[in-house]
Amino acid sequence: MTRLTATFILLTLMGMSAGCGPDETPPASLIPADYARTFPEVRGCRMTFEHISSYGAGAPSISNIRVVIDPGGVARYRVAGQTLPVGTVVVKEEYADPTCSTVIGWTVMRKEPAGYDPTHGDWRWQRVRASDRAVLEDGRVTRCINCHNTPDCTSRDWQCTQQ
């Protein structure tokens, strides 16, 4: 087994993306271009401790989020015992200010077909920086799963929808 193959396997098992080498294309963002116009809000702007992180030098830390979802998933979003349809996209807009006026990044979840990650509801996760739309994390992001792995969240298809 080559060192590159072993590294890829290890990173895959850890739930992290391996990054892009010089000949690899970075993953495309899962955020639809028209999401801001077409996705209804399901959780208004509020302070959070779960999404505090930085998007790089000069970027403020995140302390506020607003959640929107594609229209096909709205009816099931807060319903315990319901799973969201394959292809559902949930976008957590992340802000440094309490009025949620300037997006600095996004955490995105997309429901994948059964078998993608059955232990964690078959969700694919991304973290995207707003300044350049760079995908910083992609795939089975264990940092996110750790917070969403509670009965309140897993009973709602891994959505932490508490009011």
Image (tube, helix red, strand yellow):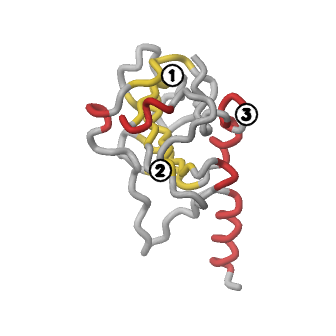
**Compared with residue 24, is residue 69 higher up or lower down, i.e. above or below?**
above
Name the kind of residue labelled 1 in the image. Answer: Asn
Which of the marked residues, 3 or 2, is nearer the chain's N terminus?
A: 2
From the viewer's perspective, is the residue at label 3 or at label 2 nearer?
A: 2
Residue at mark 1: 64
How far across and how far down the image is residue 23, in percent?
A: 42, 75
**Compared with residue 35, is residue 134 higher up or lower down, i.e. above or below?**
below
Check residue 150 in the rendering and tell me which mark sits there, or answer none: 3
Please indicate whether residue 3 sits to the left or right of residue 124 in the image.
right
Q: Label 3 vs label 2: CA separation?
A: 22 Å
Q: Label 3 vs label 1: CA separation?
A: 21 Å
Q: As rendered, which of 132 and 112 lies closer to the eye? A: 112
Which of the marked residues, 1 or 2, is nearer the chain's N terminus?
A: 1
* Mark 3 crowdedness (10 Å alpha carbons): few <14, some 14-19, many ≥20: few
Point 43% across, 43% down: residue:
89
* Mark 2 crowdedness (10 Å alpha carbons): few <14, some 14-19, many ≥20: some
